[in-house]
């Protein structure tokens, strides 16, 4: 196996870093956790990079490795204490025209997502990033039917939280 | 509008607020040590394999052979040692096979399954060693008791109580160590894997 080109990898990492930041926002609650997970995902990507053959787009490959790291390999995330007001640090709602109800609803949804289990979070993350069901199912390792069923459950859960406010 | 569609619109706008790391910050990150759960499972597994191999090497020496000869259980103990060696080789091969299957580029479910199976191979290895240990301990113990000609009946109850307590204490300590180490390491993985299984 030839020695991987570090400069080329760092360039790709810099270009596609938004993918990692979005996963960090989904799975961590503070700046320190964000940086920690980002670093672990970068390390795992670098370790896996020599086996990247280019069959898939780099961003698709990166998404999969990073998500696997956040859900499966990363150890520190669960040690952190969940605090309600941290959602405001992680997500800044930017309604085009300021609407307090919309802002409140969006904040409530982010809060509801933070309470989901790891797999449901991944499902929502992929959905929000415009991945279709075949890709969601393939990334997570479940059938498309199961992905749809789970997604509907998540939607209902979020709706319930909004109605209960 | 679907609630999540509303959220999707906002999610796209979030990209503008995301941090940006430059090459100077990204490059040193790659030199840092990983805290991956797989790395820890690997380290602990190697310690486990080494621990039991060292215990075997320490126990089986000339004095031990003399003692089992004296107690008249030498054939049985030698058989047990061969079974143990075959077991060690088999379990190490099984562990390596499972470990090689762990690929961070697999889908989430497959990756979790591979890690749990790797861990399971070490768990069975430990159970195998405990069973071998319990069998040889029992044989040695009862052979020693039966070789005592004097006061055999008077001491039998005392010996049995001692035997049960010893097995209980050793078993309890091993369970506690495993509960603490692996409980922390793979609780999250098992929870996530159950979530997949629930949908099947």
Image (tube, coloured by chain):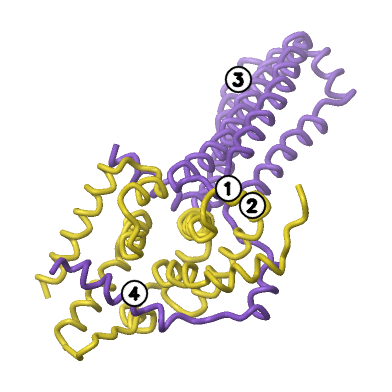
Chain colours: A yellow, B purple
Q: From mark 3 to mark 2, how far is it between C-alphas?
A: 48 Å
Task: Select label 1 or label 4 by which is in front.
Answer: 4
Q: What residue did someone put label 2 on?
A: B39
Horizontal relation, residue A3 to residue A60: left or right = right
| Residue pointed to by mark 1 | B177
Identify the secondary structure beneath mark 2.
Answer: helix
Disc 2 or 4, which lies upstream in sequence?
A: 4
Q: Nearer the viewer, residue A90 or A135?
A: A135
Subunit bearing disc 3: B
- The chain that hosts pointer 4 is B
In three-dimensional space, the C-alpha distance between marks 1 and 2, rounded to whole angstroms, equals 19 Å
Which residue does the numbered mark 3 point to in the structure image? B156
Gap in Å between the C-alphas at discs 3 and 1? 32 Å
Is A2 on the left or on the right of A82, as rendered?
Answer: right
Q: In the image, are marks 2 and 4 on the same chain?
A: yes
| Chain at tag 2 | B
**Position above or below: A47 against A145:** below
Is residue A20 at least partly visible in the picture? yes
The reply to whether the C-beta atoms of the residues labelled 3 and 1 are less than 8 Å apart is no
Q: Are marks 3 and 1 on the same chain?
A: yes
Residue B98, position in %: x, y?
Answer: 60, 35
Q: Earlier in the sequence, mark 1 or mark 4?
A: 4
Q: CA distance from mark 2 to mark 4?
A: 35 Å
| Label drawn at residue B12 | 4
């Amino acid at each position: 196996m030839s020695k991987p080109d570090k400069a080329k990898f760092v360039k790709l990492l810099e270009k596609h870093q938004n993918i990692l930041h979005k996963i960090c926002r989904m799975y961590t609650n503070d700046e320190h956790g964000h940086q920690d997970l980002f670093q672990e995902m970068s390390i795992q990507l670098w370790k896996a990079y020599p086996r990247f053959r280019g069959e898939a787009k780099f961003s698709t490959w990166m998404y999969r490795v990073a998500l696997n790291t956040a859900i499966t390999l990363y150890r520190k995330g669960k040690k952190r204490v969940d605090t309600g007001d941290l959602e405001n640090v992680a997500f800044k709602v930017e309604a085009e025209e300021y609407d307090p109800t919309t802002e409140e609803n969006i904040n409530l949804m982010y809060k509801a997502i933070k309470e989901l289990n790891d797999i449901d979070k991944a499902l929502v993350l992929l959905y929000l990033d415009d991945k279709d069901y075949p890709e969601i199912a393939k990334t997570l390792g479940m059938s498309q039917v199961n992905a749809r069923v789970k997604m509907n459950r998540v939607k209902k859960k979020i709706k319930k939280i909004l109605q209960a406010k | 509008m679907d609630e999540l569609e509303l959220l999707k619109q906002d999610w796209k706008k979030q990209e503008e607020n995301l941090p940006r790391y430059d090459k100077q910050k990204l490059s040193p990150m790659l030199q840092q040590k990983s805290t991956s759960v797989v790395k820890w499972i690997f380290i602990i597994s190697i310690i486990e394999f080494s621990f039991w191999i060292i215990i075997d090497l320490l126990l089986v020496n000339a004095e031990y052979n003399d003692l089992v000869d004296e107690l008249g259980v030498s054939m049985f103990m030698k058989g047990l040692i061969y079974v143990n060696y075959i077991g060690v080789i088999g379990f190490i091969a099984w562990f390596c096979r499972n470990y090689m299957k762990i690929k961070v580029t697999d889908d989430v479910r497959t990756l979790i399954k591979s890690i749990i199976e790797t861990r399971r191979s070490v768990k069975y290895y430990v159970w195998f060693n405990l069973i071998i240990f319990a069998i040889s301990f029992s044989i040695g113990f009862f052979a020693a008791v039966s070789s005592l000609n004097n006061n055999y009946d008077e001491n039998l109850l005392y010996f049995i109580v001692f035997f049960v307590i010893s097995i209980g204490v050793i078993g309890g300590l091993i369970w506690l160590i495993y509960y603490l180490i692996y409980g922390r390491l793979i609780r999250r993985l098992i929870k996530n894997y159950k979530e997949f299984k629930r949908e099947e």
